[in-house]
Image (cartoon, grey):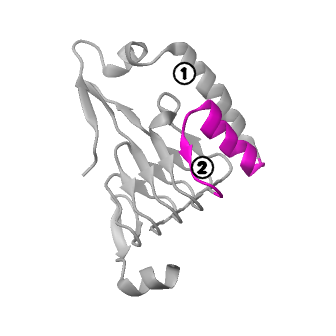
Amino acid sequence: MRNVTRYPVEGHNSLWYIYRTVSPWKGVRNFIFIQIARYCPILPLKNWIYRRILGMKVGKHTSFGLMAMVDVFFPEKITVGENSIIGYNTTILAHEYLIKEYRLGEVVIGENVLIGANTTILPGVTIGDWAVVAAGSVVHKNVAAGSFVGGNPLRELRPASAEDSSEQV
């Protein structure tokens, strides 16, 4: 289950009220720096942008692949542990705007996690240490540490085992 906070709206769809929740200037500034980071081939510089300008929590030696897209409006709600890889063109969302409500949720990606290319991670999920998410997946629920998941809808492809945990140490 995802851990999101729901905010109901009256009238038009919730996206029409976005600038009641986040400054348009923050959105523009974040968009510019996210686009720079998406194309930047220098990993330490990319992580510096994420940490210092966007307010994300990014562990040492974490690698964001080319074109990875983090949440424009709420990047500070994203945490990625040490030595993880976020694959090419992955999208990490901390918000979702629906017709009658919008939702916000922290995204926590553990240490030594591999996120395959073209994956979408929805708000409010936690991905445990040493987990692997197959390319092209939609992560709509929490992922246990050490497990191998994939698909849409997300399903466990191989459960974590005690052997896996001891081999990874």
User: Do the CB atoms of the residues marked 1 and 2 lie less than 8 Å apart?
Assistant: no
Crowding near the residue tagged with mark 2, few <14, some 14–19, many ≥20 C-alpha atoms within 10 Å? many
Residue in the image at 63% along x and 31% along y: 53
Q: Secondary structure at mark 2?
A: loop
Which one is nearer the viewer's eye here, 13 or 8?
A: 8
Marks 1 and 2, the one that precedes in the sequence:
1
Does the magenta segment cover residue 48?
yes
Q: Secondary structure at mark 1?
A: helix
For residue 149, above or below residue 67: below
- Compared across the picture, whether 57 is left or right of 21 comes to right
Task: Tell me residue 14's x, y (percent).
Answer: 32, 21
- What residue is at 68 percent from the left and 41 percent from the top? 48
Q: Residue furthest right?
A: 42
> Crowding at label 1, few (<14), some or many (≥20) Cα neighbours within 10 Å?
some
Tag 1 residue: 27
Q: Position of residue 113 (x, y in %)?
A: 51, 64
At 21% from the left edge and 14% from the top edge, which residue is drawn? 10
The amino acid beneath tag 1 is Gly
Residue with the mark numbered 2 = 89
Magenta residues span 41-61
> What is the quadrant of residue 97 in the picture?
top left
Query: Could you say where residue 67 lies in the image, as x and y percent from the top left?
Result: 65, 45
112 shown above or below 123: below
68 horizontally vs 155: left or right: right
What separation in Å lies between label 1 and label 2 (alpha carbons)? 20 Å
At label 2, the amino acid type is: Asn
Look at the image and say whether residue 74 sits in the magenta stretch: no
